[in-house]
């Protein structure tokens, strides 16, 4: 279950938007913060139903948007026409490698790349505010 402090903050943010904290909305938050996968709304919705949560698809969608807005989760687009969501709160910054054969999404972090891209932006007179780094890969054939 989501810890009390996060729950309290969630409730305050919801009321800021004129929304009430319902058990359905709290279940979406809980589902997202307790899972490290990259899932589509439909998969998240089905996971909630499988856990016995009474929620509509529309509420799931709207709550996910809310969670993106307040940076509990991140929306990702790998260009395959699907929108996926992943946990952001408490999940370290990372990039993604996407296997074009299996569809697996592998997370990685490389300090050298981070430093290098900061340097490149700086050399052009900019600083990075957001970046999307996706590598499309396939397995190396083993002989
Ligand atoms: Zn990720």
Image (tube, rainbow, N blue to C red):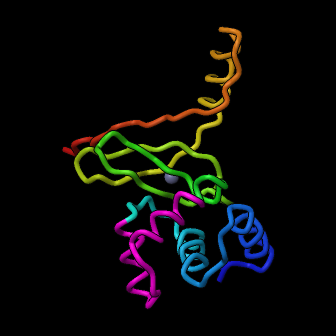
Is the residue 52 above or below the residue 69 in the image?
below
Residue 55 is one of the magenta-drawn residues? yes
- The total of numbered circles placed on residues is 0
**Of all residues shown, which one is farthest toward the top?**
124
Position of residue 29 measured from the top left corner of the image (x, y, whole percent): 59, 72
**Of all residues shown, which one is farthest toward the front?**
18
Quadrant of residue 49 within the rendered picture:
bottom left
Of 110 and 118, the residue lying toward us: 118
Q: Residue at x 45, y 64 (%)?
A: 61
99 relative to 105 in the view: left or right: left
Tell me the quarter of the image containing the N terminus: bottom right
Is the residue 82 above or below the residue 16 in the image?
above
Of 16 and 105, the residue lying toward us: 16
**Of all residues shown, which one is farthest toward the left?**
143
Of 95 and 88, the residue lying toward us: 88
Q: Residue at x 59, y 29 (%)?
A: 113
Find the magenta span and give its range.
Answer: 42-66
Position of residue 88 measured from the top left corner of the image (x, y, whole percent): 61, 56
Quadrant of residue 123 within the rendered picture:
top right
Q: Residue at x 67, y 23 (%)?
A: 118
Position of residue 143 measured from the top left corner of the image (x, y, whole percent): 19, 44
Position of residue 115 measured from the top left corner of the image (x, y, whole percent): 68, 27
Chief secondary structure of the magenta portion: helix
134 relative to 9 in the view: left or right: left
Of 110 and 32, the residue lying toward us: 32
């Amino acid at each position: 279950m989501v810890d009390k402090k996060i729950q309290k903050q969630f409730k305050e943010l919801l009321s800021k938007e004129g929304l009430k904290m319902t058990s359905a909305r709290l279940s979406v938050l809980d589902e997202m913060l307790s899972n490290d996968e990259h899932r589509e709304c439909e998969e998240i919705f089905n996971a909630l139903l499988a856990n016995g949560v009474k929620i509509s698809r529309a509420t799931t969608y709207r709550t996910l948007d809310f969670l993106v807005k307040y940076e509990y989760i991140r929306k990702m687009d790998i260009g395959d026409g699907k929108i996926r969501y992943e946990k952001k709160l408490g999940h370290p910054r990372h990039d993604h490698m996407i296997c074009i054969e299996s569809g697996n999404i592998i997370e990685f972090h490389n300090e050298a790349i981070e430093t290098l891209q900061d340097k490149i932006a700086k050399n052009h007179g900019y600083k990075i505010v957001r970046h999307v780094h996706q590598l499309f890969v396939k397995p190396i054939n083993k002989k």
